[in-house]
Image (cartoon, helix red, strand yellow):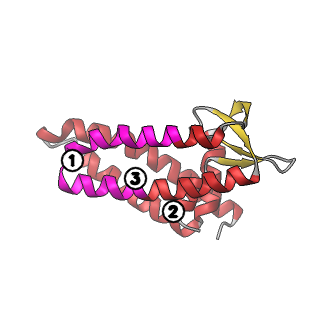
Amino acid sequence: MSYFDGLVNASFKKRDDGQTIFYPFGVIGSGYVLSEDSERKIRAFLKWYTKICLTSVILVLIISRYYVIFLLPIFFAVYLFKIHHFLSGATRIPGRMTIAEYSKNMAYSMGLPMCVMLLVLGLLAFFASFICLFIPRGRWAGLLGVVFFGACLAQSIFMVRYCVQKKCS
């Protein structure tokens, strides 16, 4: 599967009774029981949405990094509106998805090669941020980068270990 499949599949969980639970805010919020039709529509939307958001953010960062501040609230509003529409009538369930479940779903969907690539990129970004800590004008960016990419690196390590143990393809 692909990187985007992993991002999308991370928010879904199959119960023992075969029902699909969707966690629109990942580990932060509650889940919703979906019909097959709703699941198909949400998966299609999320795949399209993640591709558009990532591409747009990269392009805007190339043009001018400050305009991203205006773009992110628009993306969030679109997400909220569409997900609210898709979940109308869905049953909300108590409980949350754990970080481990979220990471396992993502790792299984992406496969070992993609998880290793994310680990390598995470290492590079972490060390680049660490170097920025020693540049007087880059200390804050370096600190934020070390924290953010350190968390990304920890998740990537978990995902690679999971893929090796479960023999993800």
Give SS at disc 3: helix
Side of 46 where 35 appears, left or right: right
Amino acid type at mark 3: Cys
**Residue 124 visible in image:** no
The residue to which callout 3 is attached is 53
Q: Quick check: marks 1 and 2 in contact, CB under 8 Å?
A: no
Gap between marks 3 and 2 measured at Cα: 14 Å
Residue to which mark 2 is pinned = 3
Indicate which disc, 3 or 1, sits on the residue closer to the N terminus.
Answer: 3
Q: Secondary structure at mark 1?
A: helix
Q: Which residues are magenta?
A: 52-81
Could you tell whether 37 is left or right of 77 in the image?
right
Is disc 3 in contact with disc 1, using a CB cutoff of under 8 Å?
Answer: no
Residue drawn 28% across and 39% down? 70
Picture quadrant of residue 107: bottom right
Local packing at callout 1 (Cα closer than 10 Å; few below 14, some 14-19, many 20+) is few
Query: Which residue matches tag 1?
Result: 65
Residue 108 position by quadrant: bottom right
Sequence-wise, the earlier of marks 3 and 2 is: 2
